[in-house]
Amino acid sequence: LQKQLADKEKLYRAEAAALTDIRRTEAEKLQRELLSHLKDLGMEKARFEVRIDLLTEPGQNGMDRVEFMLSANPGESLKPLEKVASGGEMSRIMLAFKAIAANADSIPTLIFDEIDTGISGNVAQIVAKKLAQASKKEQCIVITHLPQIAAMSDAGYLIEKRELNGRTVTEVTRLDTDAKVDEISRLIGGAEIGAYGGLHAREMIDWAENFKKGLL
């Protein structure tokens, strides 16, 4: 029995060493690809590292402890991702991960809450494009305040809070085409922006539809 145990441990350690080599190779690739996506998503100053530390005792996932490290801003040291990333940063990082791993997993639904925190303009449009690409394989539920992202939706919903009989209630309303235009116009410039806001909103929606059809 002791010989069998020694043989099994020898085999385990050989397999674990091979797994470590694979992880280190893939970690370098992941770092490069993720940083490329984060640059597009408005985090061009971010640093990301896959830290792989060897364990002294065998574990069920090999002889490694793998941790994602992030520095979101210049001058900050690398720290564990889950401890330093804000909600908006985490959403963008998860979107970047999803773009990389789109063909490797089978998650049916992705939820991005306030992915637009701290972004605007061209970066917001890039985020909208990446969400549209991700949604070709999985359903994406996105909570946003940016017109660029809202215009890219296949189905728009308005979430509102109001008081009813002394209580606060939340209502969710499916938007038809005209209502979607109105809400995106409101996101662009407020409730009193006028006819030009509606024209701009329709133009954004048309652009988004053409992008999703592959016409752009």
Image (cartoon, rainbow, N blue to C red):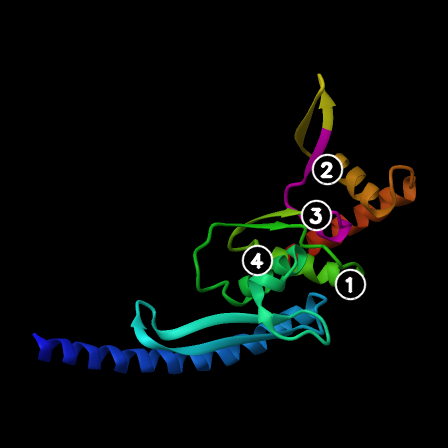
SS for callout 4: helix
SS for callout 3: loop
Residue 65 in percent (x, y) is at 42, 72
From the viewer's perspective, is the residue at label 4 or at label 3 nearer? Answer: 3
Q: Which residue is mark 2?
A: 177
Q: Residue at x 70, y 48 (%)?
A: 144
SS for callout 2: helix
Which residue is farthest front?
Answer: 56
How far apart are labels 2 and 1 at the CA level? 24 Å
Q: Quadrant of residue 168?
A: top right
- Can residue 93 be seen here? The reply is no
**Amino acid type, callout 4:** Ala
Residue 63 in percent (x, y) is at 34, 76
Q: Which residue is mark 3?
A: 144
Q: Magenta stretch: residue 150 in it?
A: yes
From the viewer's perspective, is the residue at label 3 or at label 1 nearer? Answer: 3
Residue 18 in percent (x, y) is at 33, 82
**2 or 3: tag closer to the N-terminus:** 3
**Amino acid type, callout 1:** Asn
